[in-house]
Amino acid sequence: MKTKNTPIIWVLPVTLCILLVMFYAFYSGKNMVRRYVPHMSAALEVKLEAAIAHLWFEEAISGDSYVDIDEEVWRHIDKAEWYANVMLVGGEDSEGEFIPLEDPELRKKVEQTIEGIHAFRLFAQKRWREKDKSGVGTDIDQLFDQTFNKFLASADDVVLAQKRAMNRELEQFSQIQWGLIIALGALAIFMGWFLQRYENRRADDMEALQASESLLAKTQHMALIGSWSQDLASNVMQCSIEACNILEVDSVNSDFSFDGLLKRIHPEDQSFVKQSYNQSIAERTPLDIILRLRFEEGRIKYVNLRCQAVYDGGGKAQRFVGSIQDVTEQKQSEEALRRSQKMDAVGQLTGGIAHDFNNILAIILGNTELLQTRVGGDEKVEKWVQSIEKATERGAALTKQLLGFSRHQSTEITVVDLNQTIKQMTDLISRSVTPQVEVIYHFSKNLWSTEIDLGEFQDTLLNLVINARDAMDGRGHLTLETDNQVLDDAFCFLNPDATPGRYIKLSVSDTGKGIPLELQSRVFEPFFTTKERGKGTGLGLSMVYGFVSRSGGYIKIYSEEGIGTTFNIYLPFSKRQAIESLDTQPEELPRGSETILVVDDEVGLLEVAKDSLEILGYEVLTSVSGKQALDVLNKNPNINLLFSDVVMPGGMNGYELAEHVTTLRPDVRILLTSGYTEKAIAHNGQAKFSASVLGKPYSQVDLARRIKQTLGDKA
C-alpha cells in the first residue's frame, strides 16, 4: 500500500487530545477551587474579622467615644464565628459556596478556632466590664492577648492545612496531567496512524475504482459496447460514456429518456422494439435484439440491444439494465462475406450450367454443319440453318463468358505493364465508344508491373469501357487512370475483401447516370443489369469480377446518381519485376502538428482518418455534417485544414462546405475526398476544387502525402 502524505489527517486526533487535556485541567481546577479556596478564604476572613474586632476593642478600651462596642466589636466577632461555622456545616455568601470540611483533622482545627473565638469573646466581655481595672499589663489584659494569639494561630493552622492539602492535590494533578498528556498523545498517534491508514486504503480503493472504471471505459470503447439502465417509473435512462457515444448524446448530461432512444430508432424498427420490450416484461425473459438507429444526417447504425428487467418483491418490473453494442462494422463484414459466398455459389452454379450448355451447343452446332451438307440448293432451308448457326454461336459466346466468370484460375499469366497495355488499346477503346465521348488518359510514372492474364485484362477493360459508354448514353467524359497504391490494415479493415499489400490501381470513371446505392452490391451478379431490357446480358461486370478475383486483386465501385460511376481495380504488384525498381525500405510518412477538421458522414472512415492523422502528430477535430463542421470552425480559430467528404446528406455537400469555409476563413486549406479521382471530378461539373481531391478509398500513405502537400501548397 502506498503511503500518502496527508497532514490534515492528524489535525483531528491532535485537536481532540488537546481539548481533552484542557477539559480535564479546567474541570480539576474548578473542582479544586471549589473545595479549597472558599475555606481558605473563610479562614482568612476569620482572622480578618478577629483582627478588626481586636483593633476596635483596643480603641474602645482606650476611651475613644466614637467606637460603638456593639457595632464595631461584637459584630465582627460574630462574623468571625459565622465564617468558622460555615466551614463545618456549609453554606454560601457573596464569596461563593462553602462545602463542609470532610477531613477530621481540619474539622478539629476549625473547632479549636471556634473555641478560641468563644474564649476571645468571653475575655473581651470580661475586660470590657472591668475596663477601669484592666489596664495594660494586667493579668486580664495578658490573658486577653494570649487568647487572641492562640485563636489566630489556630486559624493560621486551618489556612496552612488547606494550602498543604491543595499543594498535594496540585502535585497529584500535575502527575495525572502529564500521564494523561502522554496517554492522550499515544492515543492521538494511534488515531492519526489509524486514520492515515484508513485514508490510504480509501485513496487506494478510489484509485483502483477509477482505474477499473477507466479500464472498463476503454474496454467498452474498444468493443463498441456500452451499459445503460432505465427506471420504468420515471422512464429515465442512465448511460455509460460508450453508450452515449453510440447513441450520440452528450455524456455530460447522461440522463437520457427512453422516448429519446425511440426517436433515434429507425421508424421501421420502432414497433418491433416496443413489442419486444413489452414481451420481455410480461414473460420475464431477457431481451436480445438487433435494430437500426437513424440520425439526422440520414446515417444508419446497427446496434445489438440486450437487457433484463429487475422486479420488486411483488413481481412488478422496476427497471431495465442492459448493454448496447455498435455492430455496424460486423453487419458490413457479414454482408461482404455473404456477397462473396453468394458470388462463389453463383460461380459454381453458372460454371456447371455453362459447361453442360456448352456441350449441348456443340451438339447443335455440329448437327447444323452436317445439315448444311444435305440441304442442297434450297435457299429457304439454308437460311434457317444459318439462323440456327448464328444463335448457337451467340449461345457459345455467352457460355464462354459464364465460364470466364466461374473459372478460379487464369491460364496464361504474364508480367504486364498496364500503361503500355492501355496505350496499345487506345484505338480499340476509341472505336468502342461514340465520337461524343471524350476519353482521357492519366498514366502514372514509374508504374509497377503486375502478373495477370493479358487477354482477360483486355476483355475486362473493354467491358468497363462499354458499360461506361452505355451509362453516359454515348455522350460525356471517360477517364482512365493508373497509379501505384499500398493498401494498409486500416484500408482493409473498412474493405474486408481486400488484403494488405502493394497494388497497381486502375480507375475507370464516367459521367453517366450513376447506380442507386441499393443496387451497387448486385452489379457483379451474373445476369443482373441496370440497363433497359434487350440492351445487356448482365455478364460483363461478372466477367470483370471473375478476372479480378482470379488475379488476387480487389475491385471497388463508387457511384453517385446523376454524377457518374468509378470502378477502382487493384491488381497485385509483381514480385518478378526488376529488383532495382522496388522500394524495399518502408516509407516514412510525412508528419505535422497542425489542426485538421475532418468531415465525413461515414463514422468508420471518420475514425480511421482521425486515428491515422493523430498518429502522424496532427490535432484532429471531427464532424459528421457540413452544418456541424461550420459550428466547429467558428469555435476553433486555430484550424489549418478542412478534410471533407464530397457527398454528404443534410443539405450541404463537400463543395458547398468548402466554399463557405473559403469565404469565412481564407487561410484554411481545403482537401476533399471522393470515390471519384481528382481527374474524373474535373469533368463532372464540380471542378472548382478538383485539384484538391483525394480519391476514395485511400490508404494512410495517400492521406499523409496529400495532407502534407495541401498544407505546404501556397497556391
Image: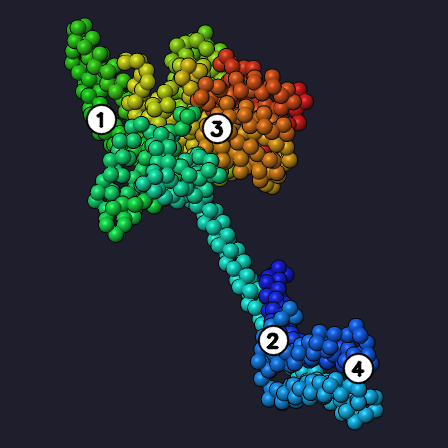
- How many angstroms separate mark 2 from mark 4 (CA)? 35 Å
For the residues bearing labels 1 and 4, Cβ distance under 8 angstroms = no
Q: Nearer the viewer, residue 375 or 688?
A: 688
Instruction: Classify residue 74 by image quadrant.
Output: bottom right
Q: Indicate whether 511 appears above or below 358.
A: above
Secondary structure under tag 1 reads helix
Q: Nearer the viewer, mark 2 or mark 3?
A: 2
Query: Residue at 42% of width from left, 39% of height from top?
Result: 255
Q: Indicate whether 620 appears above or below 506.
A: below
The disc, 2 or 3, on the residue closer to the chain's N-terminal end is 2
Which residue is under mark 1? 357
Q: Nearer the viewer, residue 654 or 309?
A: 309
Which residue is under mark 4? 61
Color encoding of the figure = rainbow
Residue placed furthest toward the bottom: 139
Q: Nearer the viewer, mark 2 or mark 4?
A: 4
Which residue is under mark 2? 98
Q: Quadrant of the N terminus?
A: bottom right
The disc, 3 or 1, on the residue closer to the chain's N-terminal end is 1
Tell me the crowding category of disc 1: few under 14, some 14 to 19, or many 20 or more residues within 10 angstroms, Cα based.
Answer: some
- How many angstroms separate mark 4 from mark 3 (CA)? 121 Å
What is the three-letter code of the residue carrying label 4? Answer: Ile
The disc, 1 or 4, on the residue closer to the chain's N-terminal end is 4
What is the three-letter code of the residue carrying label 3? Answer: Val
The mark found on residue 624 in the picture is 3
Residue 58: tell me if it is visible: no
Query: Residue at 65% of width from left, 88% of height from top?
Result: 115
Q: Nearer the viewer, mark 4 or mark 3?
A: 4
